[in-house]
Structures are given as structure tokens and as C-alpha cells.
Amino acid sequence: MSGVVHLVKTNPALAPLFVFGGSGIGAGVAYIAHCLRNGPDVTINKSSAVKPWNRIQPHENAKLWSPNKEFWQQRRENATRRNA
């Protein structure tokens, strides 16, 4: 770490490289942690649920980003109508 600080002090133009590179690595680690914690098809604790993907209801969206939000809103409304 001290080598990086010394390198940035001698050449300040490298500072954005380390800032954006470090933030990209941090974002990648955060995304992997998100997928491991919230992903229905990823199992770390093999003793709790044999098939964790069965926890997803038909009206729930398991994607991180979905371009068709109206479809999932309509499925959620249909599921609440059936349950009521």
C-alpha cells in the first residue's frame, strides 16, 4: 500500500486510475456478495434448504434488473387477487 501512495505522490496523474480501478473492484466484490446472499440459485449453506429456488413465488422477480417492470407488476396484482 505504501508503494501505491509513493507512486501517486511522484506521479499524481495516476490517482484517477487507482480510484476508478479500486471502485470497480469494490463494485465487483459487492455484486458477488449480493448474488451469494440473495440469489435463488446459489446455495452456500447446504443444510438449510435442499432446493432454494423453490422459495420464489410465481409473482416474484428474481432478476437484479428487469426491463419489463409492467409484466411483474401485473403478475403481482394477479397473485393478490387470487389470494384475496
Image: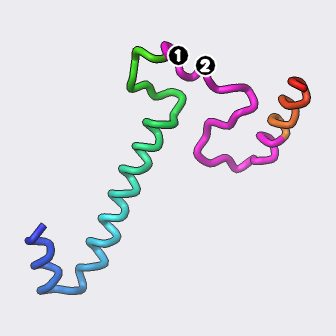
Asked whether 64 falls inside the magenta stretch, the response is yes
Q: Residue at x 85, y 39 (%)?
A: 74
Instruction: Name the residue type under label 1.
Output: Lys
**Above or below, comparing residue 28 to residue 75 in the picture:** below
Whole-percent x, y for residue 20 in the image: 34, 70
Whole-percent x, y for residue 32 in the image: 40, 44
Res 9 quadrant in image: bottom left
Res 18 quadrant in image: bottom left
The secondary element bearing badge 1 is classed as loop
Q: Residue at x 62, y 48 (%)?
A: 65
Relative to 50, 22 lies left or right: left
Start-end of magenta stretch: 49-73
Relative to 73, 32 lies left or right: left
Badge 1: few (under 14), some or many (20 or more) residues near its Cα, within 10 Å? few
The secondary element bearing badge 2 is classed as helix
**Above or below, comparing residue 65 to residue 19 in the picture:** above
Q: Are marks 1 and 2 in contact (CB under 8 Å)?
A: yes
Instruction: Name the residue type under label 2.
Output: Asn
Residue at image mark 1 = 51
Residue at image mark 2 = 54
Asked whether 38 falls inside the magenta stretch, the response is no
Which image quarter holds the C terminus?
Answer: top right
Whole-percent x, y for residue 22 in the image: 30, 64
Q: Residue at x 70, y 50 (%)?
A: 67
Identify the main secondary structure in magenta: loop
Which image quarter holds the N terminus?
Answer: bottom left
What's the distance in space between the residues labelled 1 and 2, CA to CA? Answer: 6 Å
Whole-percent x, y for residue 38 in the image: 51, 36
